[in-house]
Amino acid sequence: MDVSIAFGALLVVLGFVAGIINTLAGGGSNLTIPALIVLGLPAEVANATNRVGVFMQSVSGIAGFRHHNRLDTSDLVPILIPNIVGGLIGALAAAWLPSSIIKPLLLGTMLLMAFLMLVRPKTVMSDATETTKSVKNTPAAWLGLGIAGFYGGFVQAGVGSYLSPHFAAHCATTLSGEMR
């Protein structure tokens, strides 16, 4: 696999842009995964390789938000448990499925996520007047976070949008109403 200097520079620029997008809102993988596939990596390898950058962006984002007191960690454990369990199951599913299935699933979910972000931005953006509910006080939200974890483990592209406090609050409100 030969990579020209221009294509390598483009990958570096895309990586920086995707890092900024992922840290602030999520969805940067919609740039990096297709670029890695165009480079010649199989879809499952591009998906897995993308996770290294996403992990580093997450660590950097957490450190920055904590440093500036912009990260509420009071609900951390109840958020992490369903996400980690769902993520592990999703990652195992992605590792088990053949490339012939992973590639169309990746493309389809990335297109769907981009479409949702463009057509229904309120799905992924929080309203400034909306109060965020605590996940530990709303156990029904665990299902939504587990599903988001599975999606993140399986595909990852755009999962940051669904792991926002807005989504957790929406899951808590919706699932609590359905379970009554």
Image: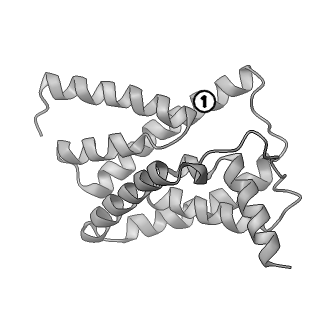
In the displayed structure, does residue 163 sit left or right of residue 95? right
Residue 139 at x, y percent in the picture: 82, 65
In which quadrant of the rendered view does residue 6 lie? top left
Instruction: Name the residue type under label 1.
Output: Gly
The residue that appears at 72% across and 62% down in the rendered structure is: 171
The residue shown at (69%, 61%) is: 82
Residue ID for mark 1: 61
Describe residue 124's horizontal placement relative to residue 157 as left or right: right
Quadrant including the C terminus? bottom right
* Secondary structure category for the residue under label 1: helix
- Res 176 → quadrant: bottom right
Q: Whole-percent x and y of residue 25?
A: 55, 38
Q: Is residue 10 left or right of residue 139?
A: left
Q: Where residue 35 appears, x then y in whole percent?
A: 26, 41
Q: Position of residue 7 (x, y in %)?
A: 17, 29
Split into 4 quadrants, where in the image is the N terminus?
A: top left
Q: Is residue 157 visible?
A: no
Q: What kind of colouring is applied to the model shown?
A: one colour
Q: Is residue 31 above or below residue 115?
A: above
Q: Nearer the viewer, residue 18 or 77?
A: 18
Which sits in the foreground, 92 or 14? 14
Q: Residue furthest right?
A: 137
Is residue 68 placed above or below 79 in the rendered structure? above
Would residue 85 be visible to someone looking at this image?
Answer: yes
174 left or right, relative to 44:
right
Q: How many marks?
A: 1
Residue occupying image coordinates x 50% and y 37%: 22
The crowding category of the residue bearing disc 1, from other C-alpha atoms within 10 Å (few below 14, some 14 to 19, many at least 20), is: some
